[in-house]
Image: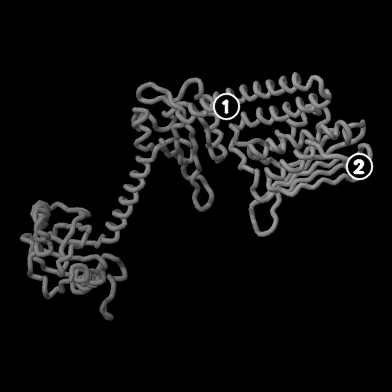
């Protein structure tokens, strides 16, 4: 802006002392604008061209003033200039039209342009003024947003799950294409709580109660229930929803999925049936073995038959628990309680169980179960449980040793208050079970201490051996 240029008169922002001051002030505004400001006649001849126009289109004022505005218009868009001039002649304003115009280099420049008619003192349209803004960055941002949305929709519509989004209050406002393909519904039918219409009436109340709890508390939601398809068939779905939070931790929306598990449920039912059949036949086999042993050994020591039968019952108890866990494994506490069931009235008083939730695999469970049974039987006959005052402490834990971050199982059987203990004079089947079988199952170190005050048996397993991850609820 020229140094000697002053703003409008001090008494009014709209007043100027002279016409020359007025013209100079307006010229300064136009020259300082970051938007291209161009004027043209009604036939499209350019009459003024500010510095921003030069920067935007590459032409200097000397090069372009007196030329037709059509020089900036791509051939395919010449019809736009026809429409613009027609509107201007009628005194109309063309407001924020997005289009492209040509740079001197031939490159196209995306712009947003507003064209207004110029009126003379009698109000007659004598030309047009154009204000253009380069929107290259906005176009690029839109393009990136559109590409991002396209990628999201491609992913969302092609995943195998039904997917949806809800606002912070739990009102669902978006579903993916698979939801509509499966249910045969429309967004208007499903918005808000419309999804209840495709739920089975026997389950809907439970589902609503549980999901409302998550809406209210912000807890992750998970449930299993049937949904009706467009053919009227109900199929089972495992459904989950996660809260999406902002930087302040506030919930902005929820994202949920429904995974069809109908075939998986059917397979699990088939497996459960087969495992039940196998377990039944296994018990029948154990019963047959027991009968054969009794018949064959009827003239042998009766104590042998009794011990043999009890060990078969111990093995059957472990099998029952393995069946419930699909033969993957079982809770260590459940295993301990199953093997001490014949001493159940002492658990909590003279038999104290302490330890976290730990799961052992099928092989380890069978070996450890038999060892616990042998220890319990020995304690009841000769050890701490053979009198009225003795006690047994069974403790288990996971410990990390050395550089390996994977934990290993540690379990101990500690007797106290029983008759004085002395080492056995002979080693029978029980000793083999207590020492060798568990050592093999857990790759562990087994320690037997026959202290006079009470037997102590400890197992220190190697990292991860004999353990499995705790199943989800």
Residue displayed at 84% across by 34% down: 378
Please name the residue shown 72% across and 38% down the image: 368
Label 2, on which residue?
A: 422
Marker count (numbered): 2
Q: How is the image coloured?
A: one colour
Residue 275, disc: 1
Residue 66 placement (x, y as % from top left):
7, 70
Q: Residue furthest left?
A: 43
- Of badges 1 and 2, the one in the foreground is 2
Front-lying residue, 86 or 177? 177
Q: Is residue 5 left or right of residue 83?
A: right
Q: Residue 35's x, y, as percent?
A: 24, 65
* Secondary structure of residue under mark 2: loop
Q: Nearer the viewer, residue 336 or 174?
A: 336
Q: Is residue 17 visible?
A: no
On the picture, is 144 further left or further right than 398? left
Disc on the earlier residue, 1 or 2: 1
Crowding at dot 2, Cα within 10 Å, few <14 / some 14-19 / many 20+, comes out as few
Determine the CA span between mark 1 and mark 2: 44 Å
Figure quadrant of the N terminus: bottom left
The residue located at (20%, 62%) in the rendering is 109
Identify the residue at image location x=62%, y=29%: 324
> Residue 130's quadrant in the figure?
bottom left
């Amino acid at each position: 802006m020229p140094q000697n240029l002053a703003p409008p008169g001090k008494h009014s922002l709209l007043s100027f002392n002279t016409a020359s001051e007025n013209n100079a002030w307006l010229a300064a505004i136009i020259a300082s604008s970051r938007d291209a400001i161009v004027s043209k006649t009604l036939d499209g001849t350019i009459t003024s061209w500010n510095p921003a126009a030069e920067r935007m289109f590459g032409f200097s004022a000397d090069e372009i003033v007196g030329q037709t505005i059509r020089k900036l218009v791509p051939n395919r868009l010449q019809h736009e200039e026809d429409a613009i001039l027609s509107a201007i002649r009628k005194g109309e304003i063309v407001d924020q039209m997005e289009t492209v115009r040509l740079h001197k280099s031939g490159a196209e420049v995306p712009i947003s342009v507003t064209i207004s008619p110029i009126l003379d003192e009698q109000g007659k349209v004598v030309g047009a003024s154009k204000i253009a803004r380069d929107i290259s960055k906005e176009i690029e941002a839109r393009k990136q947003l559109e590409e991002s949305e396209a990628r999201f929709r491609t992913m969302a519509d092609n995943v195998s799950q039904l997917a949806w989004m809800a606002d912070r209050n739990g009102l669902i406002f978006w579903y993916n294409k698979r939801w509509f393909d499966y249910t045969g519904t429309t967004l208007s039918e499903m918005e808000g709580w419309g999804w209840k219409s495709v739920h089975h009436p026997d389950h809907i109340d439970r589902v609503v109660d549980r999901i409302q709890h998550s809406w209210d508390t912000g807890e992750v939601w998970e449930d299993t229930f049937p949904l009706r398809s467009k053919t009227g068939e109900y199929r089972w779905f495992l459904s989950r929803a996660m809260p999406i939070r902002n930087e302040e931790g506030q919930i902005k929306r929820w994202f949920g999925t429904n995974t069809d598990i109908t075939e998986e449920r059917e397979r699990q039912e088939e497996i459960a049936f087969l495992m039940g059949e196998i377990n039944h036949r296994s018990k029948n086999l154990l019963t047959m073995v027991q009968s054969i042993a009794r018949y064959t050994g009827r003239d042998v020591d009766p104590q042998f038959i009794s011990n043999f039968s009890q060990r078969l019952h111990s093995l059957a108890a472990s099998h029952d628990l393995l069946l419930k866990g699909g033969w993957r494994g079982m809770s260590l506490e459940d295993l301990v309680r199953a093997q001490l069931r014949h001493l159940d009235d002492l658990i909590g008083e003279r038999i104290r169980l302490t330890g976290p939730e730990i799961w052992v695999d099928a092989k380890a469970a069978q070996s450890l179960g038999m060892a616990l049974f042998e220890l319990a039987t020995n304690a009841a006959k000769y050890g701490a449980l053979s009198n009225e005052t003795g006690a047994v402490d069974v403790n288990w834990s996971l410990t990390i040793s050395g550089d390996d971050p994977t934990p290993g199982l540690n379990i101990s059987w500690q007797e106290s208050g029983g008759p004085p203990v002395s080492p056995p004079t002979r080693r029978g089947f029980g000793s083999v079970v207590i020492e060798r079988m568990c050592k093999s199952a857990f790759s562990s170190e087994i320690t037997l201490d026959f202290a006079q005050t009470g037997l102590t048996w400890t197992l220190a397993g190697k990292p991860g051996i004999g353990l499995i991850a705790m199943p989800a609820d």
